[in-house]
Image (spheres, rainbow, N blue to C red):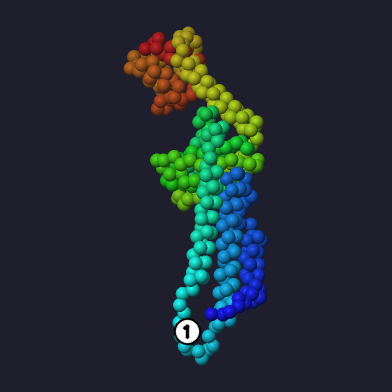
Amino acid sequence: MYKKVPIIPLAVIGIVIAAITAAQALLIDWLPPAQSEQAERTFGLLWFLFWLSAFFFVIVTSILVYAIWKWRASDDDLEDGPPTHGNTKLEIIWTAVPVIALITVAVYGYIVLERNEAVAADRVNVDVYAQQFNWTYGYPDAGIETGTLIVPEGRQVQLNLRARDVIHDFWVPEFGIKGDAVPGITHTIWINPTTKGTYPVVCAELCGVGHGVMRSEVKVVSEQEFQAFLTRSSSRVKAQTAAATAAAKLETAPGDVAAGKTIFEAKCSGCHAGLGTEAGGVGPQLKGTALDTAGIRNVVKNGRGAMPGGLVSGTEVADVVAYVESIK
Ligand code: CUA
């Protein structure tokens, strides 16, 4: 047992090792810029862990390097080292210090998790659907679906992760959060985006041949832009639904037999002989058809066999159906 700690050589070795460690940490871009509150906390915790580890790493390695250099055995020294007994003081120190370090890390980690998962009352709900090999985003409150995730800056977003086939993993590196999308369950993560911009969405779980291209984008926009996006998208969906309903109504409304006959003459009589009342044309005789109204409408709209669909549309459908009904 030596009497004095060799401060100077230890310090020199320590400074060299610390410089190499710090250079690696500082000169390489290990992490993307944090663009969410969660990423700020997570990256903060990560760097805290790194510097804490680096601190002990430098102490342990410096003593190790010094010991190897100072007390190395000469080539002709074949003796065993002298026997030593325990050092109570040292053992207490090397037990207490790691215990304190672990408790510190555990408490810090707990605080970060607790804050990262604190749910805000005004959060935006988005359903994330993962499927080989793409992402779909549903906004249940607005009733719309998109291929790009659009979220407001400065408000919490709750992502309900779901998988339609195999396990995927939703990851936006700048948000500092990953979440598995697992078939059969919904896994929830929360993100508070802090900066407007476009960031990549990456699948971080090997899910098949297209895993590497299973990417999408998240756009963080202002609250006004977000509201405009919701209104625009949901009014487009409403307009489409309304148009489809209106078209279906037109087609099923009572048609006009005379108008139907005129349309039939122009568009159908080339194939259906005698305006549909006689056999012998390219198309069958319609008089005596076994089809009911819905069946006739279906053929008029969608065609059958050699007859193409889409020859008539809108109110014409109802008129032609009325005419065919009148001769059947
Ligand atoms: Cu989906 Cu990898």
Nearest to the observer: residue 183 or residue 42: 42
Tell me residue 154's x, y (percent).
62, 37
Nearest to the observer: residue 288 or residue 32: 32
Tell me residue 105's x, y (percent).
53, 55
The amino acid type, in three-letter code, at marker 1 is Pro
Tell me residue 310's x, y (percent).
49, 24
Cβ of mark 1 under 8 Å from ligand 1: the answer is no
List the residue tagged with mark 1. Answer: 82
**Res. 55 image quadrant:** bottom right
Q: Name the residue rendered at 47%, 84% in the picture.
A: 82
Nearest to the observer: residue 167 or residue 111: 111
Q: Name the residue rendered at 46%, 41% in the picture.
A: 187
Tell me residue 242's x, y (percent).
52, 20
| Residue 10 in view here | yes
- The correct choice, above or below, for 10 with respect to 101 in the image is below
Q: Name the residue rendered at 52%, 44% in the picture.
A: 114
Q: Quadrant of the C terminus?
A: top left
280 sits left or right of 105 in the view: left
- The correct choice, above or below, for 317 with respect to 170 in the image is above
Nearest to the observer: residue 306 or residue 150: 150
Count residues near mark 1 (Cα–Cα under 10 Å), then give few for <14, some for 14-19, many for 20+: few
67 sits left or right of 166 in the view: right
* Circle 1 SS class: loop
**Res. 164 image quadrant:** top left
